[in-house]
Image: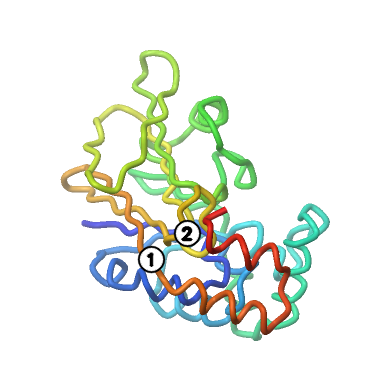
């Protein structure tokens, strides 16, 4: 069975549509949260994800959009975008976002927005990963939140290894090892590459692949400008920052 794992769409429906062929080819789709925030099309993204019956957890922006997360924890740009998002959500989108749980745990994998056991924690480096993986309940943990693709491995021999992320190969995961996997962001990448990012996992062959897909960034920027969203959020899309 092939899993498509996506995260941090952030109301970027153009980017979400661009990765649709990968979603259609997958047997199951997992979303690690932050469907909304920052971008110009929150309702379209919510409806798309809901209609696909995606297995999904909530992110902090999803919670903030429905008054379940303190907006004061955001910087001024994120706060302004969230205020616009909350004001423009449909009732259907609100019901959808309110219905989301913070974790999904299966026999094989844990799915969470940021980290285990703290869904709001960021994993930027091996020290962060060590904390997250110490009590990880499954061999695999998929998490987003940083907007940067990443792959960490704990072989049980002491220390966490951060593996280089490449899109030109598949990673054969080793049974018995623990992995912390960030697929990157669909709608707001921050690793210097503006292309939408996702991960594919084949649970039969135990192989993992990272994928990037270009999309029409300028079209999204034009929509954001038309809604007077913060200029810094508009500019950064083109640079993947």
Check disc 1 and report its element: helix, strand or loop: loop
Above or below: residue 194 compared with residue 128: below
Nearest to the observer: residue 138 or residue 115: 115
Relative image position of residue 203 (x, y in whole percent): 23, 48
Residue on which the image places disc 2? 194
Q: Which residue corresponds to mark 1?
A: 214
Contact? badges 1 and 2 (CB < 8 Å): yes
Task: From this view, report whether residue 121 is shown above or below residue 113.
Answer: above
Q: Is residue 200 left or right of residue 36?
A: left
Left or right of residue 122: residue 179: left
Q: Residue at x 26, y 64 (%)?
A: 26
Q: Residue at 77% across / 72% down in the picture?
A: 83
Quarter residue 165 falls in: top left
Residue name at image x 38 percent, y 56 percent:
198
In which quadrant of the rendered view does residue 180 lie?
Answer: top left
| Rendered view: 209 above or below 233 | above
Pointer 1 local density, CA inside 10 Å: few below 14, some 14–19, many at least 20:
few
Q: Earlier in the sequence, mark 1 or mark 2?
A: 2
- Quadrant of the image for the N terminus? bottom left
Query: Which residue appears farthest toward the left when viewing the image?
Result: 205
Spatial distance from mark 1 to mark 2, Cα to Cα? Answer: 7 Å
Q: Is residue 60 above or below residue 135?
A: below
Q: Secondary structure at mark 2?
A: loop
Q: Residue furthest right?
A: 72
Residue positioned 58% across, 79% down in the render: 41
């Amino acid at each position: 069975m092939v899993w498509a794992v996506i995260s941090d769409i952030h109301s970027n429906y153009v980017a979400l549509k661009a990765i649709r062929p990968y979603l259609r080819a997958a047997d199951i789709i997992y979303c690690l949260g932050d469907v909304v925030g920052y971008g110009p099309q929150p309702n379209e993204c919510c409806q798309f994800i809901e209609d696909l019956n995606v297995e999904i957890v909530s992110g902090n922006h999803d919670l903030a959009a429905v008054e379940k997360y303190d907006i004061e924890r955001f910087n001024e740009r994120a706060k302004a975008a969230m205020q616009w998002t909350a004001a423009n959500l449909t009732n259907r989108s609100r019901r959808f976002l309110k219905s989301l749980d913070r974790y999904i745990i299966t026999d094989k994998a844990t799915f969470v927005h940021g980290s285990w056991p703290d869904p709001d924690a960021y994993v930027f480096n091996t020290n962060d990963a060590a904390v997250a993986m110490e009590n990880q309940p499954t061999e695999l943990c998929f998490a987003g939140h940083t907007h940067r693709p990443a792959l960490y491995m704990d072989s049980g021999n002491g220390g966490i290894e951060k593996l280089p992320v490449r899109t030109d190969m598949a990673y054969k995961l080793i049974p018995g090892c623990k992995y912390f996997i960030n697929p990157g962001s669909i709608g707001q990448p921050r690793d210097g590459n503006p292309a939408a990012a996702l991960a594919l996992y084949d649970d039969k062959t135990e192989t993992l692949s990272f994928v990037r897909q270009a999309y029409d960034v300028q079209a999204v920027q034009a929509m954001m400008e038309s809604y007077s969203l913060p200029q810094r959020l508009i500019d950064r899309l083109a640079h993947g920052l």
